[in-house]
Amino acid sequence: MGLTIALAGNPNSGKSTLFNLLTGANQYVGNWPGVTVEKKEGKLKSDKSVNITDLPGIYSLSPYSLEEVISRNYLLQEKPDAVINIIDATNLERNLFLTTQLIELGIPVVVALNMIDVVKKNGDIINVPYLSGKLGCPVYEISAAKNTGVDELVKAAVAAAGNKDAKKADPLHIFTGVAEHAVAHIEESLGDKIPENEKRFYAVKLFERDSKIKNSISLDAGTLAHIEEHIVEAEKELDDDSESIVTNERYIYITDLIKGCYKKKNKVLVSSSDKIDKIVTNRFLALPIFALIMFVVYYISVTTVGTIVTDWTNDVLFGEWIIPAAAGFLEGIGCAAWLSGLIVDGIISGVGAVLGFVPQMLVLFIMLAFLEECGYMARIAFILDRIFRRFGLSGKSFIPMLIGTGCGIPGVMASRTIENERDRRMTIMTTTFMPCGAKLPIIALISGALLNGEWWVAPSAYFVGIAAIIVSGIMLKKTKMFAGDPSPFVMELPAYHLPTVGAVLRSMWERGWSFIKKAGTIILASTIVIWFTSSFSWSLQAVENYEGSILESIGSAISWIFLPLGFGNSKAAVATILGLVAKENVVGTFGILYGFAEVAEDGMEFWPRLQADYSALAGYSMLIFNLLCAPCFAAIGAIKREMNNAKWTWFAIGYQCLFAYCVSLMVYQFGCLFTGNANVLGVIVALVVFAAIVFQLVKPNRNEMKLSAA
């Protein structure tokens, strides 16, 4: 059996970069048992017998978040052969807090001082031998981004893992006076229930009154009472609660450690990151800069570079090469008409209509990955926390929303980092308002076909999502179900750095590949069903041009629902409903129903067919509804798992669909009013909806008043 090495460290310490460097393509992603949090494992590139496990980024081994619980349980129960503790060398004090806890676990620890190149560039000096001697474990200087010092680190970790059964020395870090006395007594009380090299960790956690640790040990009532006496005595003497005592002791030790090993060249020097932050996190400039950056991102990916490649994919690759070649080949071999129609008009046209937008998505994902890797998106979470808190949301809610721009499923899962149950449920309900990768083809299709490819369409979709989240946050916080203060927001802001090409491309590919896989499975199956139901009647007789088909009858039966929104014909109705299976189906359905297989060489034959059925205003209304309504079935499944309650799941779906309907209704009816095509009844209904939303936004929050009074 091979060795197992775990990677542990703070968020933004470079842990993922190191994991990718160590494992390369030899990695696989799943979920931790029983929870929907991503689990990354891989094989060491230089030695396939060594397994590498990437633990979630954490600040401590206290059970305050799901990530901390997962990491601690893994270390205590799975007992890896060694731990590589990745430390951001530019922020030693904060990172060493976790190190002091890892060392107490009794597992061999090797410390990696990452970003050492930045430390040296600043002219600072870290006395590595001194730090190693004080911590009692090997310490290595590395730069994961530049792949320096990593080989020596790995050799040391493998050596430590292979020698894990060697007798461990007593911990070099002990508390002072009263606190250490209490911990020592608790260690004695544990007897032989805990291995000798783990007693220190369990004793400290029992001193902190960690309920999960207490429940994991079978101690009798007398022993627990004896332990509690020591804790109470220490609290009385030090005039503080036990958890704060331990935290204070750790930071006293860390402060002394840093004084002995870290020398700054210039203590008053303002770093480059600080200089940049003075501008990009400025109270007045932060949001305009964010808006400008997102405009540029979407402009490049949807309107310029992405569109050029997408047009070539649609017009040349599929329009001139694949579809005519497939049609000619099938005709040449005498293929049956129905089978040829299935393959060309159904599978190739439907899946091709979706895959044609992959280039735009990849360009978008590259740009978003760059912003994440360089450290800017962490600042946006900090900036939006100030805004979100005014509307009842925590800045932590932005993290799931950011992840949701790639795919709504991991975005929903990321809500697990929010401790407050009310905030977590609200975040789950609103995260999918952000346009995910699957919605990008819808944006591109409607923008190109009905809105002349206007530059503002794609950025507006992003900001409509943010506005929907803010408006929902204000309204929902004024209900009894969601009343209460938002969760506190704590986040380490990493130093700005130039991302590696590998990290950006890997992030882009992970997001893009999940979309391509969906196109090859769910979308493929959906297009076959769409083709069949649009090509045959209920009596299974072949029909021409969709008229009299099964799908046409279904669409006609439900199309009245969307009449007030401007797209009340059967084709748009079925496309929207099938979008619940997978959002890409909206484009795939249009591709089949409007004859994407017959696009001419100039690529413009498809657009007039849409323009004949929908106005620009109706198209934008359709776009808004599909952006805000309930997500795809897979994301709904994630919502169900995270809510863990059928009623809450149905409430979330119902709210999303109702909110989308109301916003789309107002957009279309008020648009008709301004363009002189108003329907009196429609405008009246839209005004009533608008008045109801405004009233909910401005009315006093009586639930907050009651909580304050209590």
Image (cartoon, helix red, strand yellow):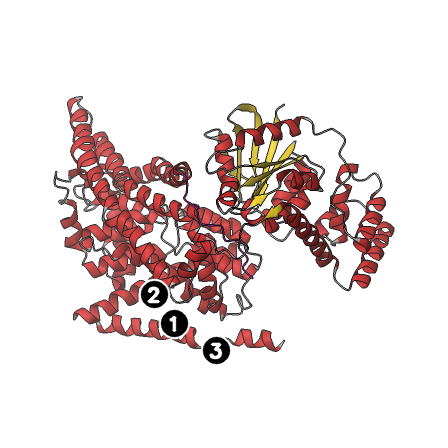
Q: Write the residue at 52% across / 49% down.
A: 641
Magenta span dominant secondary structure:
loop
Q: Which residues are magenta?
A: 488-500
Q: Which residue is mark 3?
A: 700
Q: Is residue 146 magenta?
A: no
- x and y percent of residue 94 in the render? 60, 51
3 or 2: tag closer to the N-terminus: 2
Residue situated in front as seen by the camera: 36 or 299: 299
Q: State the image quarter where residue 510 is shown.
A: top left
Label annotation for residue 662: 2
Q: Which residue is mark 1?
A: 693
Measure how far apart labels 3 and 2 are at the Cα level.
23 Å
Q: Are marks 1 and 2 in contact (CB under 8 Å)?
A: yes
Label annotation for residue 623: none
Q: Is residue 199 above or below residue 175?
A: above
Q: Residue furthest front?
A: 265
Residue situated in front as seen by the camera: 104 or 228: 104
| Residue 75 visible in the current orientation | yes
- x and y percent of residue 686 in the render? 30, 71
